[in-house]
Amino acid sequence: MKALQYRTVGAEPEVVEIDTPEPGPGQVRLKITAAGVCHSDDFVMNMPAEGFPYPLPLTLGHEGAGTVDAVGDGVDEIAVGTNVVVYGPWGCGQCLQCAQGLENYCPRAAELGIFPPGLGAPGAIAEYMIVDSPRHLVPIGDLDPVATVPLTDAGLTPYHAITLSLPKLVAGSTAAVIGAGGLGHVAIELLRHLTPARVIALDVTEEKLEFARSVGAHEAVLSDADAVDAVRKITGSRGVQAVFDFVGYQPTIDTAMGIVGTAGDVMIVGLGDGQATAKIGFFAQPFEVAARAPYWGSRSELIELIDLAHEGVLDIAVETFSLDEAPEAYRRLGANTLTGRAVIVP
C-alpha cells in the first residue's frame, strides 16, 4: 500500500510503498477515506536529530477517518463496513483518567510506549491503518469523512479548551482567538455556537482576518505590536474573559497576557517553538488570571463533536490533496498558505 512517511530527520516526508498491515488480536484495520494534516506534524519534523522521540520511518497522520475493513481476534464491538473517525490520544485504558475518557491525559502512556497514530504509532496518511482498540473509533454514519476528519484534532482541541472556559463566557463577555488557521477558525465557529460571547480574532494578514470574519468573528485585529492596545480599545478596562492562543510563540502569548481581564483564562494551545511561556506573578497580569496548556480532548468530547456535525452547525474549511500530493500539503502547511485544514484523500 501507499503511505506518507517521515523517514529521515530534517528531510521532507515521502510517499512510499509498504506492506498492508494485518490487525492483531483486539485491533481494527481501517481503509482510510480521509486524513488531516496538522502543524503538530510540522513541529515534529523540525525537531533536531538529538533526542528525536519517535522511531523512523513514521507514517504520518493523527487525524484519521475510514471504513472498518478487517478486525482482529476478540473484536466484536464494531462491524466491518462501519464508517468511523479515530480518537487519537491513545492511553492505557486502565487508569483514572482513561476511565473518564481523558486518554489525552493518561499518565502511563509514555512509560508503556503508547503513542498516538502519526505521532509515534503508524498514522492515517496511508491507504490502510491499524487502530489499537475499537474504543478509539467513533462512528460517523453518513457524514462526509473529508469534512469530518478535522474534528478529531482541529475540532476536538479547541472544543476541549473552550469547554474549560464556558463558565466565564456568559452574556456580555469577550473571547479572543489568536490565529485563525486550521484550529482557530473552528474555535470561532464553536464559540459562536456554544456561547453568547463577543469573539475577537487576531492574525497577521488582512486575508486571514477576513477569513475569520467570514466564519463568525465579530471583530478582527492585526496581531502585531499594537494588538494589545487595539483589543483594549474594543473591550475597555474589563479586558477579555478567555483568550485562546492557537499559535503559541512568545509574542502571541505576551499578547494573550496583555489582553486578558481579571479572573480571565489564557489557553495556550499552539505549540509555537516549544519554548514560549506565560509570565505569571502578582504584578504580571490582572488578578486571578489562569494560564493553562490544554492538550487535545476526551473521547466523550469527540462524540459530542460528531453529534454537532450531524446537526450541521460546523463548516470546516478544507483543502484536499491526493496521497501522491501529500508532500505538497506539508510544504503549504510550512509556508502558512493553507486556508483552513489540509485533508489527504487516498
Image (cartoon, rainbow, N blue to C red):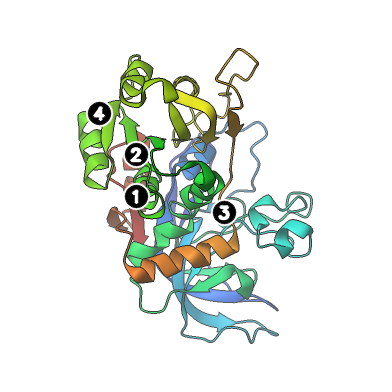
Give coordinates of residue 291: x percent, y percent: 59, 31
Give coordinates of residue 148: x percent, y percent: 38, 64
Category of crowding for the residue at label 1, using alpha-carbon neighbours closer than 10 angstroms: few (below 14), some (14–19), many (at least 20): some
**Residue, disc 2:** 199
Identity of the residue drawn at 40% across and 65% down: 308
Q: Earlier along the polypeptide chain: callout 1 or callout 2?
A: 1
**Residue, disc 4:** 205
Pair 2/3: label in front:
2
Tell me whether circle 2 and circle 3 mark residues in contact (CB < 8 Å).
Answer: no
Say left or right for 148 vs 287.
Answer: left
Nearest the viewer among 252 and 273 is 252
Q: CA distance from mark 2 to mark 4?
A: 18 Å
Instruction: Label 1, secondary structure: give it.
Output: helix
Tell me whether circle 1 and circle 2 mark residues in contact (CB < 8 Å).
Answer: yes
Nearest the viewer among 73 and 184 is 184
Identity of the residue drawn at 70% across and 85% down: 74
Identity of the residue drawn at 20% across and 37% down: 210
**Where, quadrant-wise, is the N terminus in this rendering?**
bottom left
Q: Earlier along the polypeptide chain: callout 2 or callout 3?
A: 2
Tell me whether circle 4 and circle 3 mark residues in contact (CB < 8 Å).
Answer: no
Instruction: Label 3, secondary structure: give it.
Output: loop
**Residue, disc 1:** 192
Q: Is residue 73 above or below residue 203?
A: below
Give coordinates of residue 31: x percent, y percent: 45, 74
Q: Amino acid at mark 3?
A: Gly
Give coordinates of residue 9: x percent, y percent: 54, 38
